[in-house]
Image: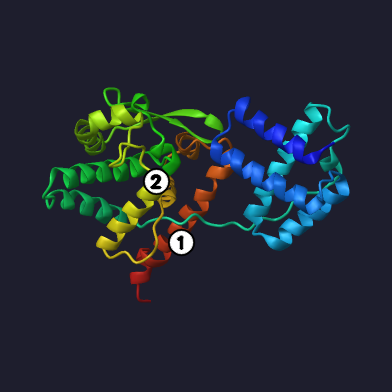
């Protein structure tokens, strides 16, 4: 087997048949070529075992886990195509203890302050262009917090994916999995309508719902810069990412006693295990409440 050729064929298969996203296929390609370079274009159990050991020495657990998953998926493809006679992973223990990394969230008051800052800046706009940009910024911030969607999902929304009449958002997540998210808050709906009315022709030209001044789709980096701008404006010193809105959305819903299975569906997690990370955050909040707010603290005995 020519390993490099097999990797190229597999990447083509991922693009054309599995219709994986460009981001995913690029990651697979990078990870598999890294293995090929390490193994000197050989593919056997010993090389895989040595490579896994190397990954754990060189990378954080989450990165190592992703690279191993890419190699496993490639191995499954080789088995299905009868390119290799047996699965070398059958005799390799890939399990390891991955430390629990609690998701970073944004304080509720900070989210409120950021949204308020965006709305307030609308009153200060002196040109039509700055007003349009502010309407877009408000719509993006509102939809991030209202839906818990990933920034990549927001930036690749098409006009057809948003049904303002029926208050729904059609999102294509990882693996091109489709999910429908309801939007019922009247302020969020108003922000989306105001944005759409201001950018209707630009949206039509771009083919994406959120657009920039060049009438191209709004980039993920532009959203990150936008969030940083408003966070700085309200004096929040810690770095905020778009994904932290997703974490905050899930955590705050959990604190409101929303069933975790509903949160799983809204976020588009294929496994409840992924969603359960937010229960750890909720427990941390519970500890804070009971240690600071409990009325026993007021008793002097």
Q: Is residue 84 left or right of residue 33?
A: right
Residue situated in front as seen by the camera: 216 or 143: 216
Q: Is residue 110 above or below residue 76?
A: below
SS under mark 2? helix
| Residue at image location 26% in from the left, 23% down from the top | 165
> Measured from the top left, where is residue 18 in percent x and y?
62, 27
Q: Nearer the viewer, mark 2 or mark 1?
A: 2
Q: Which residue is mark 2?
A: 249
> Measured from the top left, where is residue 285 in percent x and y?
43, 58
Q: Is residue 55 visible?
A: yes
Q: CA distance from mark 2 to mark 1?
A: 20 Å
Q: Residues within 10 Å of mark 1 (few under 14, many from 20)?
A: few
Q: Which residue is mark 1?
A: 287
Question: Residue 32 lies in what quarter of the image?
Answer: top right
Q: Is residue 244 left or right of residue 29?
A: left
Q: Residues within 10 Å of mark 2 (few under 14, many from 20)?
A: many
| Residue at image location 35% in from the left, 28% down from the top | 207
> Measured from the top left, where is residue 132 in percent x and y?
20, 42
| Residue at image location 55% in from the left, 37% down from the top | 22
Q: Is residue 150 visible?
A: no
Count of numbered tags: 2
Residue situated in front as seen by the camera: 189 or 285: 189
Q: Is residue 2 left or right of residue 205?
A: right
SS under mark 1? helix
> Measured from the top left, where is residue 268 in percent x and y?
50, 35
Q: Is residue 274 left or right of residue 139?
A: right
Residue closest to the far bottom: 301
């Amino acid at each position: 087997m020519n390993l490099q050729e097999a990797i190229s064929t597999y990447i083509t298969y991922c693009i054309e048949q599995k219709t994986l996203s460009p981001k995913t296929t690029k990651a697979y390609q990078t990870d598999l070529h890294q293995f090929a370079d390490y193994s000197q274009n050989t593919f056997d159990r010993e090389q895989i075992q040595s490579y896994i050991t190397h990954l754990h020495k060189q990378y954080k657990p989450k990165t190592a886990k992703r690279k191993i998953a890419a190699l496993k998926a490639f191995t499954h493809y080789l088995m299905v195509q009868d390119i290799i006679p047996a699965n070398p992973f059958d005799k390799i223990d890939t399990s390891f203890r991955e430390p629990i990394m609690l998701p970073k969230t944004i304080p509720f008051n900070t989210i409120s302050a950021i949204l308020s800052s965006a709305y307030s800046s609308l009153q200060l706009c002196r040109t039509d262009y700055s007003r349009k940009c502010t309407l877009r910024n408000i719509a993006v911030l509102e939809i991030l917090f209202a839906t818990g969607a990933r920034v990549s999902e927001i930036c690749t929304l098409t006009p057809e994916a948003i049904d303002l009449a029926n208050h729904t958002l059609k999102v294509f997540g990882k693996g091109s999995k489709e999910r429908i998210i309801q939007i019922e808050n009247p302020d969020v709906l108003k922000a989306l309508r105001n944005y759409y009315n201001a950018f209707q022709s630009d949206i039509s030209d771009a083919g994406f719902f959120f657009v920039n001044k060049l009438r191209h789709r709004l980039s993920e980096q532009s959203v990150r810069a936008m969030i940083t701008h408003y966070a700085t404006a309200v004096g929040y010193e810690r770095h905020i990412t778009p994904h932290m809105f997703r974490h905050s959305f899930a955590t705050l819903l959990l604190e409101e006693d929303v069933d975790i299975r509903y949160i799983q569906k809204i976020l588009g997690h294929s496994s409840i295990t992924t969603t359960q990370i937010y229960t750890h955050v909720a427990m941390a909040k519970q500890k804070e409440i009971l240690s600071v707010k409990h009325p026993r603290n007021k008793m002097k005995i």
